[in-house]
Amino acid sequence: MNARVNQVSTFDRKNYFYPDLPAGYQITQFYHPIIQNGEVKYRINNYEEERSVKITEAHMESDTAKMLHERGKSLLDFNRSGTPLLEIVTAPEFTNAEEAVEFAKEIQRIAKWNDLGYADLEKGQMRVDVNLSIRADEDAPLGTRVEMKNINSFGAMRRAIEGEYIRQKELLES
């Protein structure tokens, strides 16, 4: 990721209540992450064009439980709760779903190439959270950010981004 690996990184306790967090807190590197100020290059348009995105930070934290929503009920699977994960945070530089998806695919390739794991989205070995906000024009401030969590396939990631973009655009226009 061409990033700075910090000589000092610490773990913090982030307190919040949510059903998928049974202890009421999460262990995370909130204030002193292990990695900061990086960049990842990726390709779009069938590998014809190279882009890059800034990596704000990558930090380790404990995973939460998995929430499942079926037939009007919410179920919790605690099998992964507490296991360590690495969360990579980018700058808000993507302009469309293709860029975000191709970046996520590049992260998956990096993980596989460096034998860090299988990074199989469908098996829960890698997940994607997408934050999306739009603005009226380039000079306007970004609107309210919406986070879509635990996306488990590149197709679902594309659909989530495109659907949320349409929703936010309709709100902005109204």
Image (cartoon, helix red, strand yellow):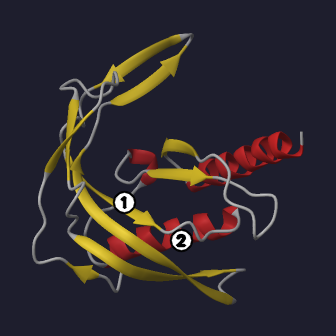
* Residue 56, quarter of picture: bottom left
* Classed neighbour count for the residue bearing mark 2: other residues with Cα under 10 Å, few (<14), some (14–19), many (≥20): many
Q: Which SS class for mark 1? A: loop
Coordinates of residue 74 in the picture (x, y in percent):
45, 16
**Residue denoted by label 2:** 103
* Classed neighbour count for the residue bearing mark 1: other residues with Cα under 10 Å, few (<14), some (14–19), many (≥20): some
* Residue 47, quarter of picture: bottom right
Identify the residue shown where x is 54% and y is 44%. Answer: 147
Q: Residue furthest front?
A: 140
Q: What residue type is labelled 1?
A: Ala
Q: Which amino acid does label 2 sit on?
A: Phe
Mark toward the start of the polypeptide (2 vs 1): 2
Image position of 126 with respect to 174: above or below: below
Identify the residue shown where x is 37% and y is 63%. Answer: 88
Coordinates of residue 62 in the picture (x, y in percent):
21, 45
Q: Which residue is at the front of the view, 120 or 143?
A: 143
User: Gap between marks 2 and 1, in whole Å?
Assistant: 14 Å
* Residue 92, quarter of picture: bottom right
Q: Which residue is at the front of the view, 20 or 27?
A: 27
Q: Residue furthest right?
A: 174
- Kindly check if marks 2 and 1 are in contact, taking CB atoms under 8 A apart as contact: no
Q: Which residue is at the front of the view, 107 or 142?
A: 142
Coordinates of residue 171 in the picture (x, y in percent):
81, 40
- In the rendered image, the quadrant that contains the C terminus is top right
**Residue denoted by label 1:** 119
Q: Nearer the viewer, mark 2 or mark 1?
A: 2
Q: How many labels does the image show?
A: 2
Q: Which SS class for mark 2? A: helix
